[in-house]
Image (cartoon, rainbow, N blue to C red):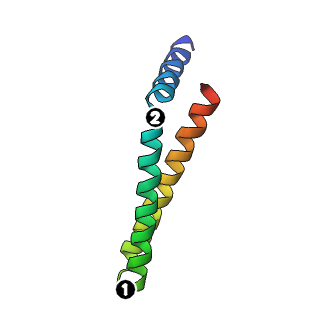
Amino acid sequence: MDILAYYWQKLAYQIVHKTTLWLLIVFFVTAVVAWGLSLVLYQQNVRYREANFARKTAAFYAAAALTLWLFTVIFK
């Protein structure tokens, strides 16, 4: 059990200290660009699969940025 606690503390320390403002900005900008790409692809009637993938990608990057930010705020 102590080994699990050790690795959790080590992982939390790495996440908190490696997450910078620039990483969060890159994640949010990537989410916005992917969302914009999905809007462009939806305007073309034959690109629904690619548009859905772009939306899922945008949602993933936004969720990852929000999760990293919350983790950093809580465990700092």
The image shows residue 12 at horizontal and vertical percentages of 52, 25
- Left or right relative to 15: residue 72: right
| Lower position in the chain sequence, tag 2 or tag 1 | 2
Q: In this orientation, which residue lies closer to the viewer: 68 or 36?
A: 36
Q: Amino acid under label 1?
A: Gln
The image shows residue 11 at horizontal and vertical percentages of 48, 24
Q: Return the residue found at the far right.
A: 74
Above or below, 41 against 63 in this view is below
User: Residue 20 has which mark?
Assistant: 2
Q: Amino acid under label 2?
A: Thr
Instruction: Measure the alpha-carbon separation of dots 2 and 1.
Output: 37 Å
- The quarter of the picture where the C terminus appears is top right
Q: Return the residue found at the far bottom.
A: 45
Which residue in the protein does label 1 denote? Answer: 44
**Dot 1 surroundings within 10 Å: few (below 14), some, or many (20 or more)?**
few
- Left or right relative to 68: residue 45: left
The image shows residue 25 at horizontal and vertical percentages of 45, 47
Above or below, 58 against 52 in this view is above
**Dot 2 surroundings within 10 Å: few (below 14), some, or many (20 or more)?**
few
**What is the secondary structure assignment of the residue under circle 2?**
loop
**What is the secondary structure assignment of the residue under circle 1?**
loop
The image shows residue 29 at horizontal and vertical percentages of 43, 55
Q: Residue at x 43, y 81 (%)?
A: 42
